[in-house]
Amino acid sequence: MVVRILDFIFAARPMLHLPIWSIFLVSYHYRHGDFSASALIVLIGLTLIGSGTYYLNQVYDYESDLLNRKLGFLQKGLLEKRQLLIAGITLSIVAPIIGAVQSLVTLAVFVPLIAGSIAYSLPPFRVKDRPLAGLLVNAVGYGVLIPMTVPGMLTRLDRLDGLLAGYFFLTVAATYLLTVIPDRAGDEKAGKRTYATMLTDRTIIITALALLAGSILVSLLLLHHLLVPISTIGFGLCLFALISKQPSHVLLACKVPILLLSLLAGYYYPGYFIFLVVLLVATRIYYRRRFGIPYPRLN
């Protein structure tokens, strides 16, 4: 029973929740400062939405994940499609209830987040297989809607709040573009139409560089001096990947900015940093014992 519970917890891909948690916490600190019970409620709701998204994604991406040799709980027979489907639907129902507990405004932001997460993987929408739509769902969902779940952000939106959402929109869009590159081979075999199957690595990386350059400018306009180096380092790593043409450097350019943003959130909220350390150790132990591999890794 304990092992099965752990399988469900890690099948929710908690390490992939770092952008969700960290973007929210950095945005929350920007607006409020000290952590509060309302922030915890919203974080729980966002975690449920993210978990439901990853459950459903694994069900409907079974074949392409197999072709891309992605680590799969379904492919390894640890969980069944029916189980993940039920779990994904259940969390998608519970999450808006959590949002309503916080406020009707939070509920109003949770609804499009959930709708986007469902449309991302489920037919007939399959937004993730539609290049522009997939990019926008990720950039708007992570970059705009998650900051808007911060209590008071949407109801008292000002110019700086809009710039903060713009900053995350640009950085998430750049990261999303880079993440499609490693999936090219599997996407081509599966007959998918993605940016990776349509464009060269060079074109994708140059576009990501332009988006990151925009995020640097926005962070300067925000006068948020701790966001400036994150975008600058991301830009440098992306440029390095363009020059080196090494797949491992593309992955590094994807992951390091997320790590830096998480460290920033941990700097603001030390309890979050401790949580991340515990999660990292637990994840390494789980994947080593259950799959026999080191995970997570930077490359």
Image (cartoon, rainbow, N blue to C red):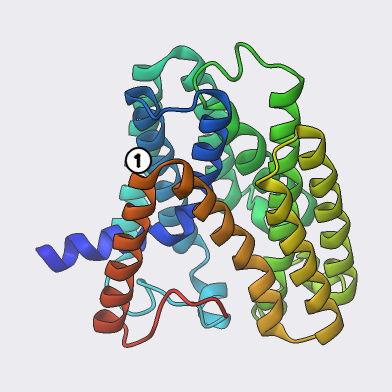
Which amino acid does the dot numbered 1 rest on?
Leu
Classify residue 105 as left or right of residue 6. Answer: right
Q: Dot 1 lies on which element? A: helix
The mark tally for this picture is 1
Q: Is residue 51 above or below residue 29?
A: below
Give the percent coordinates (x, y) of residue 189.
68, 81
Give the percent coordinates (x, y) of residue 168.
69, 43
Classify residue 295 as left or right of residue 197. Answer: left
Q: Residue at x 74, y 87 (%)?
A: 246
Identify which residue, 30 or 52, lies in the foreground.
Answer: 30
Identify which residue, 118 or 9, lies in the foreground.
Answer: 9
Identify which residue, 255 or 7, lies in the foreground.
Answer: 255
Asked if residue 197 can be seen in this view, the reply is yes
Q: Residue at x 64, y 74 (%)?
A: 252
**Which quarter of the rendered picture does the C terminus lie within?**
bottom right
Give the percent coordinates (x, y) of residue 45.
39, 34
Give the percent coordinates (x, y) of residue 269.
41, 42
Classify residue 106 as left or right of residue 277. Answer: right
Q: Is residue 135 above or below residue 179?
A: above
Q: Quadrant of residue 183?
A: bottom right
Identify which residue, 291 or 126, lies in the foreground.
Answer: 291
Asked if residue 185 can be seen in this view, the reply is no
Which residue is denoted by mark 1 in the rendering? 91
Q: Is residue 42 above or below residue 276?
A: above
Q: Is residue 274 above or below residue 203?
A: above
Q: Residue at x 85, y 61 (%)?
A: 209
**Which quarter of the rendered picture does the N terminus lie within?**
bottom left
Q: Quadrant of residue 247?
A: bottom right
